[in-house]
Amino acid sequence: MVHIKSAEEIAIMAEGGKILATVLYQVADMAKPGITTMELDRAAEALILKYGAKPAFKGYEGFPYSLCASVNENIVHGYPSNTPLKNGDIVGLDLGVLHKGYNTDMAVTVAVGEVSFEAKRLLKVTEKALRLGIKKARAGVTTGDVGNTIQRFIEDQGFGVVRDLYGHGIGKQVHEDPLVPNFGKRQEGTVLKEGMVICIEPMVTMGDFKMKRSDDGYGYATRDGSLSAHFEHTLAITKDGCRVLTVAP
Ligand code: MG
């Protein structure tokens, strides 16, 4: 069931989204060679608490941390680890904030030090796929229209788009209806309506899009070991388009 949010609920989610974006960009700036993703997790949690919010992922389906950190071939849901990041790595940082009873969800993937030309292109393409999906999202279009836009762009760039994980609605729960796939056919899926709040989150692979459970047993990695990137925003469908809620001031 899709929950339509009132203007008041969306205002609360925008406050939470502002906290989330502020924290996530600070943590992303810390992702330099030598730091561990466990240190990034600790920093993310401390910052969220400092802003008076709660980490939304901690305890969610048994996840024991605040930050998901997915390095290189890891796609999403990676456990933070004590292995230092190396020059040339890419790391996906996915963070959720619970503020006044409402969740927001956001992810960026960042280059650690100097990365390859192809890795840079992967990050750019994934971020642009998210931007195009956001541009498409408005009342009256379907989740399939959004997914089709994202998929066509990614595949035109020669990359793969993950099929087994989706974006989602969000609100009092981290994951609500509808599913928001990053692939699909126009005019299929759920029709977006004013007051829906959704997360769009393309997961892009440099090689084949097929995935497997990663070594930590919780996250997912590419089956062929190719690099993967992930960007995400939380946005509200408005009368004449959409409003991204995970925005830093
Ligand atoms: Mg999400």
Image (cartoon, grey):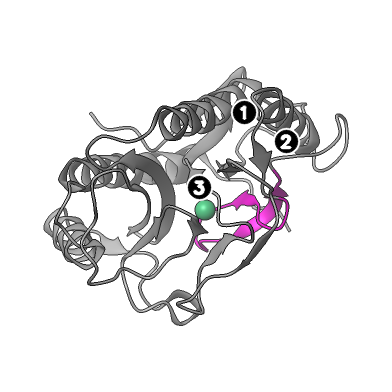
Q: Residue at x 33, y 40 (%)?
A: 110
Among the 4 quarters of the image, the one containing residue 70: bottom left
Circle number at residue 227: 3
Q: Are marks 2 and 1 in contact (CB under 8 Å)?
A: yes
Circle 3 SS class: loop
Q: CA distance from mark 3 to mark 1?
A: 22 Å
Label 1 neighbour load within 10 Å: few <14, some 14-19, many 20+: many
In front of the other: 91 or 96: 91
Residue 147 is marked as 2
User: Which amino acid, mark 1?
Assistant: Gly
Looking at the image, is mark 3 or mark 2 nearer the viewer? 3
- Left or right: residue 1 versus residue 105 is right
* The stretch drawn in magenta includes residue 247: no
Cα–Cα span, label 3 and label 2: 21 Å
Q: Residues within 10 Å of mark 2 (few under 14, many from 20)?
A: many
Along the horizontal axis of the image, is 187 left or right of 10? right
Q: Residue shown at 75%/38% (left/top)?
A: 143
Lower sequence index among marks 3 and 1: 1
Q: Relative to residue 230, is residue 112 drawn left or right? A: left
Tell me if 43 is positioned left or right of 89 in this view.
left
In x, y percent, where is residue 193? 70, 34
Instruction: Provide the residue span drawn in magenta.
Output: 163-181
Q: Position of residue 108 (x, y in %)?
A: 39, 42
Question: Which residue does the numbered mark 1 point to in the structure image?
Answer: 133
Amino acid type of the residue that numbered disc 2 sits on in the rendered structure:
Gly
Helix, strand or loop for disc 1: helix
Query: Comparing marks 3 and 1, which lies closer to the viewer?
Result: 3
Q: Residue at x 41, y 46 (%)?
A: 107
